[in-house]
Amino acid sequence: MNTQKLNQWIEKELVENKTIQKKVAPAPATNKTSAPKKTIPAKSNSSKTPSRRFSDHNPNRGRKTAYKRHAFHPTTRLKPGNHGTIRVIPMGGLEAIGQNMTFIEWENDIIVIDTGILFATHEEPGVNGIVPDIEYLKKNKHRIKGVIYTHGHLDHIGGVPYILPQLGFPPIFTTRLTQAMITGMAEEYGFADKLRFTSVDPKSKMRMGRFEVEFFHINHSIPECLGVVVNTPYGAIVTTVDFKFDYKPADGHMTDFAHIAHFGHKGVALHLCDSTNATIPGFAQSESNIIEPITKILKYTPGRIILTLFGSNMSRASRIIELAEKLGRTVYLSGRSLEKNVGYARKFNYLKCKDKTLKRLKPGVKMGPPDKTLIMCTGGQGEEFAALSRMARGEHKQVILKPEDTIVFSSSKIPGNELQIFNLMNKLVDKGVNLIEGKDESVHASGHGNQEDIKLMASLLDPKYFVPIHGDQYLRHANKTMISEGLDFPEDHVLMMEHGKGIVLNQHGAKIMSDKERVPTKKAYYEDMVRLREETIEERKNLGKKGIIIVDVENNKGTIKKINIRTHGFFLLGTDEKAFSPLKKELTDTFNRTYDPARSEKALEETLKKTAQNYLWQKYKKEPTIEVVL
Amino acid sequence: MNTQKLNQWIEKELVENKTIQKKVAPAPATNKTSAPKKTIPAKSNSSKTPSRRFSDHNPNRGRKTAYKRHAFHPTTRLKPGNHGTIRVIPMGGLEAIGQNMTFIEWENDIIVIDTGILFATHEEPGVNGIVPDIEYLKKNKHRIKGVIYTHGHLDHIGGVPYILPQLGFPPIFTTRLTQAMITGMAEEYGFADKLRFTSVDPKSKMRMGRFEVEFFHINHSIPECLGVVVNTPYGAIVTTVDFKFDYKPADGHMTDFAHIAHFGHKGVALHLCDSTNATIPGFAQSESNIIEPITKILKYTPGRIILTLFGSNMSRASRIIELAEKLGRTVYLSGRSLEKNVGYARKFNYLKCKDKTLKRLKPGVKMGPPDKTLIMCTGGQGEEFAALSRMARGEHKQVILKPEDTIVFSSSKIPGNELQIFNLMNKLVDKGVNLIEGKDESVHASGHGNQEDIKLMASLLDPKYFVPIHGDQYLRHANKTMISEGLDFPEDHVLMMEHGKGIVLNQHGAKIMSDKERVPTKKAYYEDMVRLREETIEERKNLGKKGIIIVDVENNKGTIKKINIRTHGFFLLGTDEKAFSPLKKELTDTFNRTYDPARSEKALEETLKKTAQNYLWQKYKKEPTIEVVL
């Protein structure tokens, strides 16, 4: 595999110099062989002759960072042999993008990585959030030695209010920024005082029960994103969660190639790898690629600019706010998640701007001239009550759209939201505004790596087994095919997990658990904090498609006085009495035929319901929900 | 504009030779200037030296065609001056792709072009079809001189069963194939005997009241697709409906450039132009581009092939069936629309194959060996009950999927269907099959023209006014911008219509109607053949998201015996009696406080409903549908 030479070099560096942290990480793949020889002292940055090394003229290089390069710890090395079975069990993240949660079990100890949420689509009407059913972990909560959070996105931390209370608030290991975000969430639900945090950063090495856990920094659309390395006697279990390689990232923190390759060199048993963009060829676009077009828009647009982006895209929001300040625009924020994330970015020094640059777009706020205004908002997914949708409908009190306005969609379309996004765009276009989206200009870059990023990461880590995660079956299989073909990775060493059916790792290697060993789990649907029965969702789907008929039978001891039929959402007119008279006749017949004072009311209701069902199916081929009230 | 030279040439040809039909149409744009000089006699086809003209070695050139080139008719030329106002009024097709219907009104006469359907999405639950509300045309049906159908796709003819009976079955003008398709539809609804057809083809010139109408052939994914030219004293009104330029179309009928340009030369007032792919740069892919990869798949795939495509894609289905026959595969058809369309293709000689090549995939059918089998089916949009979805769920009796099977998606994703398509693909991938879709291989080409096709068509027709149709607001505005920038077309000569608010054309030119002149119309939603009230759809949406609570108050002359609360799809458990006891108490209080034998039962029910509404909102912030039954 490609990483071998790199590993050799790293080992040499580690052994001979022991000062890798003063050196610059080698450039990736292309000039890998020559890079190690040409290390340049750190001072060359200020030398008069311009350096040809990318890292020396990277404007972000000098930024104050939360992370410093560090000396490596030695890994726990148990003697070879049998040290028991280790099980890696995914609770989500394999059937859609979201609900990311995996636990690792070794003898009596369990650690959990992430407790993310899956956002509901129109196929789960009324649902606020989907998390895994964690019956097994609840029963074994005393064995949980820690929960590790890789970064602050909701598909990784959003399950906090649902999951942590069920687990009895185990110790949490994560970075300061992610801690703050989790705390903010816990405060809303009133259990912030129950959380016990241990701060980690990429140089940390933590013991959680039997487990020894290390971390490394990865680039994503939010700062302080961690790869997790769980050391085991059979090699490390590494999860690279959401990552891309970005040589010019928005948060200024470079990929630490040497650090990642170091783990690869030590020996990785399993690499759990993101599949989100596994169907997209090439390398992911750098965030810096989109900053240039956005700068141009901010600079040359004569009127007001309304820019929408994912509230979770903390890094981009921070960069754009700093840009706006430089170009003399005041930024008006709208959208709860965005406001919160911008707050965290300022608190943790990932955004440096004056107080007066930032305002909330709240009722009564006075806005400056259009060419000094940037409204930054969420709602680019067409959410019905988001500020942007209200602007489009003309219902927003502060912002009345004019043809001079420019609206920038710095976001992609999440599958399932296409229709409502098109509806939003149609309404905006009807207002005559100038609309810029990813298709027109390069104003959005994904935070996830494409095929080449995945190949590079897998090459750096050089795992024995490759495990596609974070994506539905289609994307994960695409990842499998891609890595097998693109890296000549042996196909039988690509392991495809299912929810609850993970990997067994022991001295003989790794394999997928048998169906017998499967840990039962399913999706848990929540509306507010109430867990919905699956039947409730089915009922909703039926009601939503077919409507309901309520048959009110007024009767007195076996004599029908009157039958009232009320409908909601049924295809025949609810007020059309005539349409229902044959049904009423049939119901009356059934009632008279089957009434028996000895029978329960419920049984009679059931009989009448069957009559109505048969009638409606035979006459109209319809199956509405039917409720009979005696 | 670019077409001037071409027009000059065509005029010269027409005047000097009067035999344009024997000549080959000039090659498009690139070698436009030299082409006219190099006309080659038709016989050169059989000459020994290979021709460098594309048309001479076009394998489809020799196909028997339904269309022959023809001499042009002279157009009616009224003297310049005032001949009354002509109104072009769209009834649909401007807010989504579908529901295409436009009528043209000149003094007392009306002609209608297409009566298409719009397919419902998950935002219109339970709806089978959406057509325009045509109150105005119903009132004026005696003035309708004809309905023209441009081609047999459902977004153009699907409204037949809803619209034609309302209009009293006016005379229909269309091609033989489209007639057959309309007749087939009318037979299902029992009014085939009421239809009066007049056959047209690209050489026809028809009189419909005051209107003189001509046609030209355009390429699309179904044969016999017509552009419509309505001659008026102010220039022609031309609609190019669904078209792309395809130099090697699947049905073998070439674009008749000279014919189209001829209308441009005579003078076009309005060009109503498709916007479906107005955001996609370049020329549309030729259908022949995808036949090659599909041939390879049919040839080299060792196992069974299951290919899904739009049932409406008659041309592609025909070509693939012919290919399969050549390569020794029997074709098993599944999907009602596909079976019907393949039937029409055979009947009208657009598909030539042996009887034994084609079989229906019906229960009991015996299939040959896998490598001699091609299953061709619909269901690529993830429709729940389509054969492909049933195969994916393992519910299809004839086809049990195996890892050796190859599934080809020769279709695109219709916006709004993404999620269910992904669900389908995930299930297929889970079965281990080999899945090929448009992204992997070039196995789908759109039937609609891209930006360059649109520019070429507009250049050939050289209209005074350009009118983007067929697409939502976003796509139509994209078309406007594209044509203004790409052709230097004056922006104020691009007219943006709305449903019911069309164009007024008179001797002074064309302009959009005022709001006062607007013809009232809205969407008419149908479930089966019953028109749904808009409230019904709203009720369904509410039920589907929030559920329903049925409060059954058993009472006897002012005394409550018992309150039963039943729920469907409500977020609290229907069986959780305790959760509802505070609500029952409140309802009892209200009942006791407001009961009055003099009041109607309905009024009391309303009062109790309000109590329940307030309680649920205040306690849970929920707004389910509530029904109170006394």
Image (cartoon, coloured by chain):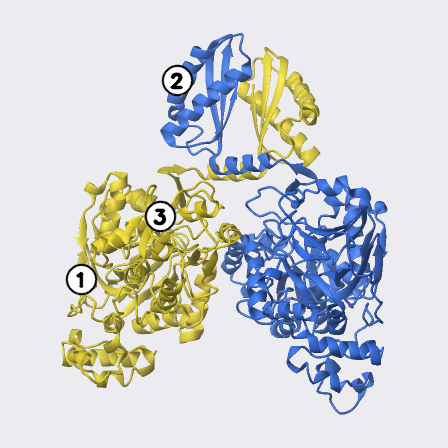
Chain colours: A yellow, B blue
Q: Callout 2: helix, strand or loop?
A: helix
Q: Which residue is drawn at 20% across and 61% down?
A: A201
Residue placed farthest to the front in the image? B81
- Give the class, few, some or many, for how many residues have Cα within 10 Å of label 1's Cα (few <14, many ≥20): some
Q: Read off the chain for label 1.
A: A
Badge 2 crowding class, 10 Å Cα cut-off, few under 14, some 14 to 19, many 20 or more, is: few
Q: Which chain carries label 2?
A: B
Q: Nearer the viewer, residue A328 or B171?
A: A328
Q: Disc 3 is attached to a residue of which chain?
A: A
Residue wearing tag 3 = A335
**Residue count near mark 3 (Cα–Cα under 10 Å), binned few <14, some 14–19, many ≥20:** some
- Co-location on one chain, circles 1 and 2: no
Q: Measure the alpha-carbon separation of dots 1 and 3.
A: 35 Å
Quadrant of the frame with the N terminus of chain B: bottom right
- Type of the residue with mark 2: Lys
The one nearer the camera, B138 or A547, is B138
Q: Residue A444: x percent and y percent? A: 40, 63
